[in-house]
Image (tube, rainbow, N blue to C red):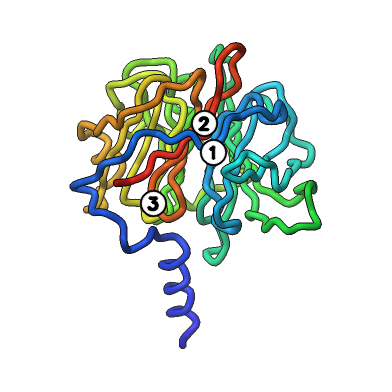
Amino acid sequence: MHTTKFVLLSLIVFFSCSEKKTTTSSIEFEKGKELKELKDKTLSELSGLATSYSNPNYLWTINDSGNDNKIFLIDENLHIKLTCILNGVVNRDWEDIAVGPGPDSTKSYVYVADIGDNEAIYPLKYIYRFEEPQANDSTQEFTITQFDTITVTLADKQKDTEALLINPLNRNLYIVSKREEPVHVYELKYPYSTKDTLVIESIVSIPVTQIVAGDFSADGKEILMKNYNNIYYWPNDNQKSLATVLQEKPIEIPYKVEPQGESITWARDCSGFYTISEMNKGKKSFLYFYKRK
């Protein structure tokens, strides 16, 4: 088999959902199922989930502002399989995490979004990108020294943002504003420099507020976003641009409102999606799974 055909075939298999997926015109999801209660204080301020490509049935997650510069690989029982330390980086306000393609089309990458800004005082936002490691039984923690820093600034003004999405088909990155209505979606087209400060512009607004997380499905045909009270879903079977599809009215998926739910991610096989909340004193937090009917 020619190398080009092999790489193309690998990508189709690697970054696609199961072919058994229900068509998006008739999507329904079951109510969120409690998989495990969050009790580990190491994960007390979770803000972001991303399904692992290199470690099937595992999820990447992070804590937000003021916590250590650590990325955790967890299972559905919320056991930590692997802890990655991002060397020399401060967790100013990490707010989301994504997994998807990157410079090497045969590998998957983790994207950590230091994009939070409650007081709208930071002119720059940072996205850290590194090759997704594979966990093994012998390694429980290691330091990542080789990573890229993608530096961006919003074209209009400084504002708080908490959601990062990557389109697996074209590697474009998207950042969504939080503390305004409507919220705005900013696009960073691939390829993007890791040496310059990149100015990103809003491509579309959505008549909602408080967006805290979002994710593309592995085949790029479905988009999820959430705020503290709602989950919004956009099917995109016809592969319209994100600016076009987000102008359409989203489907609202019944949501088990969490104490402070700031995370959402599709399952790798698109069989459903996960959410989880930060710990909140006096309230229980769970890893939920919303199964596709």
State the SS at label 2: strand
Q: Amino acid at mark 2?
A: Ile
What residue is drawn where x is 43% and y is 72%? 8
Q: Is residue 152 visible?
A: no
**Considering only order in the chain, which callout, 1 or 3, is on the residue closer to the N terminus?**
1
**Considering only order in the chain, which callout, 3 or 2, is on the residue closer to the N terminus?**
3
Q: Which residue carries the number 2 mark?
A: 276
* In this view, 240 is above or below 164: below
Residue 56: image x %, image y %? 56, 57
Q: Amino acid at mark 1?
A: Leu
Q: Amino acid at mark 3?
A: Cys
Residue 49, labelled with which disc? 1
Residue 184, labelled with which disc? none
Residue 115: image x %, image y %? 56, 28
Foreground tag (1 vs 2): 2
Residue 54: image x %, image y %? 59, 59
Q: Which residue carries the number 3 mark?
A: 270
In the picture provided, is 89 more to the left or to the right than 35? Answer: right
Q: CA distance from mark 1 to mark 2?
A: 8 Å
Of the pair 38 and 198, the residue shown nearer to us: 38
What residue is drawn where x is 40% and y is 34%? 32
Query: Disc 1 vs disc 2: Cβ atoms closer than 8 Å?
Result: yes
Residue 122: image x %, image y %? 59, 20
State the SS at label 3: loop
